[in-house]
Amino acid sequence: MKIKKFSIGSLFYNNKFVMFFSVLAAIGLWIFMALTNTEEFPRQIQGVPITIRLSDAAQADGLKVFSPVNQTATVSIKGNSLIVKQIQPSDLEVVAQLASTITSPGNYTFNLSVNKKGTLSNFDVVSISPNQANISVDRYAEKTFPIENDMKYKSDYKSDPSYFVSAPTFSVDTVTVSGPEKEVSRVNKVSVQYEINDTLRESKSFTTDLILTDANGNKVASDKIKMSQEKVDVTIPVLSRIVLPLSVDFTNKPTGLALSPGQITISPQSIEVAGPKDVLSNLTEISLAPIDFSGISPTTSSFDVNVSLPASCKNLSNVPVAKVTLDLGSMATRKMVVSNFAIKNLAADKTASVYTKSLTVTVVGPESEISKLTENSLSAQIDMAGKENFTGHTEMPVSISVGNATSSWVYGSYMANISVSPIRG
């Protein structure tokens, strides 16, 4: 069997093929002409920036354009194809010429026009889309608000009675709201809104949106308002609770003096404390700020002492000060004179003289002990630590100790005049 050869030329003797080929060629020619003939078929340049310029006087008055911002337009141009094909969005600028007439805040609508920025200018602008700009002008304003925990919008969460739920804390305390003066002035409060539905037995942390509201409690929504941050991290501290007794410490207490529990009264005797479990597990009592024995005597025996807690704990009893009263009815006082002065921590290249020859002091202790004291039982020390470079005359604190009396001490504070001078070689 003889195979018939296929010939492309033979197709053109087929009327249907010739008709199809003619239509296809016409469409192709039209497309070619549309792409090359920019006189009859304008070229569209997309992404041309829209620029709104206010007059220098308006800007000096604090006016600013808040919209449109970063908006672009599509510009159709025609002309010589060689030139038109080279035009880029950066060679054009869409402007509102009459924007220079704005002198006060408000909303304005102006027609747009095109400026040619490049070196190629031999072309015509056919159209602009959009052809108008809605311009919003106002003075710039900013205001800083504290972040509030608005309980009105929050469900009442529950906590285990064995725990204390503290006030929420935020990752930042304030937020700055900025934008058009008219919009910013509407904002009356910045708050967080959230719901806690489970029973709290441990601290809870989450991130939530910040909400702007006006004076009537209505939400303020504006795409022209900017916030220094739109979200905030919220932590709801949940702490364990425990009741702990108060105890008192002393400084400069005579080594032989023993105060029985009946001689020390603390009011209140205990307080309720909230804190992390690991911290509370190591606490058996709350130690008050120490009391210096130099300030204690039979007539000065009641003190208001600060209640200090670890930084992570909270005083639920809200008792910042406790009253400590000492029963010193068995103690006696005696006026004595001390004239034995010594200076310690004096620089090796200096010498010192004490101009105060004696001090009359009050000694407190058991009658049987202080009655046996002599003037030689008392000694006074002046500590020059931290003043090693000092020379000249000055007044320094004096520390007085009682020898041969382990249950007695000196009441009051005393000063002595000294002179310090360098040793001459």
Image (spheres, grey):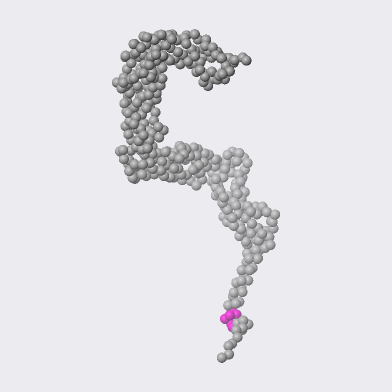
Pick the front one: 29 or 354: 354
Quadrant (top left, top right, bottom left, bottom right) of the C terminus: top right
Image: 36 above or below 273? below
Question: Is residue 107 located in the magenta-colored stretch of the structure?
Answer: no
Q: How many marks?
A: 0
Q: Which x, y percent locates residue 21?
A: 60, 77
As drawn, is 70 to the left or to the right of 197? right
Q: Which x, y percent locates residue 31?
A: 61, 68
Pick the front one: 316 or 223: 316
Pick the front one: 9 or 348: 348
Secondary structure that dominates the magenta span: helix
Image: 53 above or below 86? above
Residue positioned most to the bottom? 1
As drawn, is 47 to the left or to the right of 220? right
Q: Which x, y percent locates residue 80?
A: 68, 62
Image quadrant assignment for residue 120: bottom right
As drawn, is 79 to the left or to the right of 133? right
Pick the front one: 402 or 219: 402
The residue under the point 42% across, 38% down is 169
Image: 420 above or below 268? above
As drawn, is 161 to the left or to the right of 54? left
Q: Which residues are magenta?
A: 13-19
Quadrant (top left, top right, bottom left, bottom right) of the N terminus: bottom right
Question: Is residue 16 located in the magenta-colored stretch of the structure?
Answer: yes
The residue under the point 37% across, 24% down is 249
